[in-house]
Amino acid sequence: MNTRLERLQARLSDTQAVLIKAPYHLGYLTGFPSEDSFLLVTRDAGYFLTDFRYIELAQQRVHGVKCVMLKRLTETLTELATQHGIDTLYVETGRCTVRFCEQLRKGLPMLTVADTDEADRWLSDMRMVKEAGEIAKIEQAQAIAEEALAHVLPMIRPGVSERDIALELEFYMRKHGAQRAAFDCIVVSGANSSLPHGIPTDKPIERGDFVTMDFGAVVDGYLSDMTRTVAVGEVSDDQRLVYETVLRAQQAALSVLKEGLPCKDGDAAARRVIEQAGFHECFGHATGHGVGVQIHEEPRLSGGSDQVLQCGNVVTVEPGIYLQGRFGVRIEDMVVITEDGCRNLTHAPKDLLIV
């Protein structure tokens, strides 16, 4: 029994189907996150469509649907649509290009190709509340990331480059059980640390730098996400003030998160601390986001969000302050929402560390 597939099927009428191509959604629904493959879901059936390169592996790994070897996508879809009496085909607008949709319309003139956002919303809503098994995989990924952090801390010293630290983080995670890094590791130091999503460079770390590291691991398709900022050798009074402000902002947000809380209130809790400290123009991103089979999922801890937290949401809490051309600080934990609060999945220390 594939309960996730059944939940998606419940949203379809007898004459509707949805075509899914995002590898993370294929993995979520069938257990096999394959590139160049498709999942066709009707009200009463599911078909994993793939070519000769992947068919044998798909037959081993896919569960809950029938594997079909593709020769030409529109021909296979025509056969299956006719078999099931389908007249409307939904597609993922987040993954399907305009060209792809036009090719479907040309090759499937008997169908209405609905390139609206229904399919995207259905899948996003399903993924927002994590099952216990999903949370366990995210925790495994987070544990690997924290081991990687502990591994690289001793190498953070003057003369070592940002790029060297980023490479070591990724190498350690992959060597110790991660499928891959959850995203390109961010390691920025000194003036570069004022770039929230800066790219690691050959810049050598210097005494007095802040070094911000934002990274995560992947375990069985599920991602983790964390950020820590450390100081090298010494810190100025300004650096300490900014660090302590960010930490207080994060703690303020963590203290209010729980089932039923509007997401914008979680964002406001962190933002209020930063604004009261006089840094209101230096925190320009949201306080957090969901994490699962993608690194940015719903719900969002953002001032513009109209979402409400639910039990089982996994979200980051990552306020930051960025002083252009000087330095920046971000501290990020990942938590799972519970009825009366949240459970922190991140256990790495957060007190200001001088290495």
Image: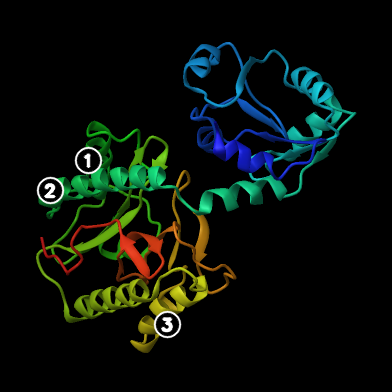
Marks 1 and 2, the one that precedes in the sequence: 2
Disc 2 crowd, CA 10 A, few/some/many (<14, 14-19, 20+): some
Q: Residue furthest front?
A: 1
Point 52% across, 26% down: residue: 34
Q: Quadrant of residue 18?
A: top right
Instruction: Give the quadrant of the N terminus.
Output: top right
Residue topped by disc 3: 280
Q: Amino acid at mark 2?
A: Met
The correct choice, above or below, for 168 with respect to 246 in the image is above
Residue topped by disc 1: 168
Secondary structure beneath label 2:
helix
Residue topped by disc 2: 155
Point 80% across, 26% down: residue: 84
The correct choice, above or below, for 186 with respect to 19 in the image is below
Q: Position of residue 230 (x, y in %)?
A: 19, 62
CA separation in Å, label 1 and label 2 = 9 Å
Disc 3 crowd, CA 10 A, few/some/many (<14, 14-19, 20+): some
Q: Amino acid at mark 1?
A: Glu
CA separation in Å, label 2 and label 3 = 34 Å
The answer to whether marks 1 and 2 mark residues whose Cβ atoms lie closer than 8 Å is yes
